Amino acid sequence: MKLLNHEDATSLCLINFNDERCLAIGTTIINDEDETPKCGRIILYQYKNQQLQFLAEKEITGPPHGMVDYHGKLIVAVGNTVDFFV
């Protein structure tokens, strides 16, 4: 996995989507001119046959401070809000 320039992985979560084991990675994109990060990404990989396979990514409007699996849904603390991702 390769991150973008000025991007750091800031949170991780193992999650089961439809009985498939996945790894969600939350990243923060840091611009030198901003005091606080303004955006990031959630990147989702499937763990199958002892390998990670890219599934999807979603841009988000703040840094992902934490993530948790909740009944097969991903709950993410983004900035000062909490969002659900399916």
Image (tube, helix red, strand yellow):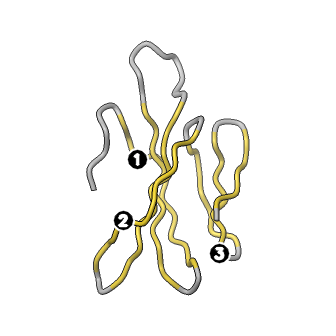
Estimate the x, y position of residue 56 in percent, counting from the top left.
45, 60
Q: Under tag 2, what secondary structure? A: strand
Cα gap from disc 2 to disc 3, whole angstroms? 18 Å
Q: Circle 1 is placed at which residue position?
A: 9
Q: Earlier in the sequence, mark 1 or mark 2?
A: 1
For the point 63% across and 69% down, the residue is 69
For the point 45% across and 56% down, the residue is 43
Q: Circle 2 is placed at which residue position?
A: 54
Cα gap from disc 1 to disc 2, whole angstroms? 16 Å
For the point 49% across and 50% down, the residue is 26
* Residue 5 quadrant: top left
Q: Earlier in the sequence, mark 1 or mark 3?
A: 1
* Residue 63 quadrant: top right
Above or below for 36 versus 40: above
Q: Is residue 41 left or right of residue 8?
A: right
For the point 70% across and 51% down, the residue is 83
Q: Under tag 1, what secondary structure? A: strand
Q: Are marks 2 and 3 in contact (CB under 8 Å)?
A: no
Cα gap from disc 1 to disc 3, whole angstroms? 22 Å
Q: Earlier in the sequence, mark 2 or mark 3?
A: 2
Q: Circle 3 is placed at which residue position?
A: 72
